[in-house]
Amino acid sequence: MSSGVSVTEECLTKYQELKLGKKYKYIIFGLNSTNTEIIVLKTSNSKDYDEFIADLPENDCRWAVYDYEFEKEGAGKRSKLCFYSWSPDTAKIKSKMVFASSKDALRRSLVGIAVEIQGTDYAEVAQESVFEKASKGA
């Protein structure tokens, strides 16, 4: 189901800068004030995972892409692009519905995502949980 929401060109440009240029560590996406476009809300090059988690609001939905780096035992350092769908239980129902129906528009436009993370509370996006998903098949 599609909501008819479009992805702005800035979303694609910033994603390419993260993916190819390693210009950012993560990007936070959201909807514009009229819920008609997916926009970039924040970019950051901070390697502090806790800072990234702090940028996911407690009561509102977001999407994010995080360039997740980890050590694989016996295989060295690895990096995977993770797509986050953040929809906390405390978010308004209308917001959750619009975000759920708009996710595919964004997700399909971001080529090269290796891992998809869905979070409704902070435990589901904790570093241990992401490591478990990212390290499978790495």
Image (tube, rainbow, N blue to C red):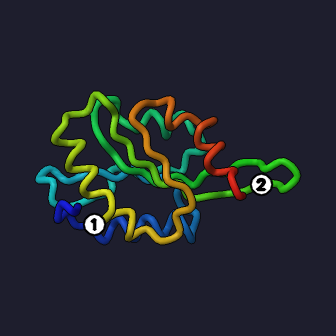
Q: Which disc is residue 7 wearing?
A: 1
Q: Is residue 80 left or right of residue 125?
A: right
In-image side of 131 versus 109 (left or right): right
Residue indicated by mark 2: 77
| Circle 1: element type | strand
Residue 59 location, x and y as percent?
Answer: 29, 30
* Residue at (57, 39) in percent of width and height: 49
Q: Which corner quadrant of the image does residue 11 belong to?
A: bottom left
Residue drawn at the location 11% of the way across and 53% of the way down: 34
Q: Secondary structure at mark 2?
A: strand
Instruction: Specify whether 61 is left or right of 124.
Output: left
Q: Position of residue 18 (x, y in %)?
A: 52, 63
Amino acid type indicated by mark 1: Val
> Farthest left residue?
34
C-alpha span from label 2 to label 1: 32 Å
Which residue is at 51% across, 29% downward?
123
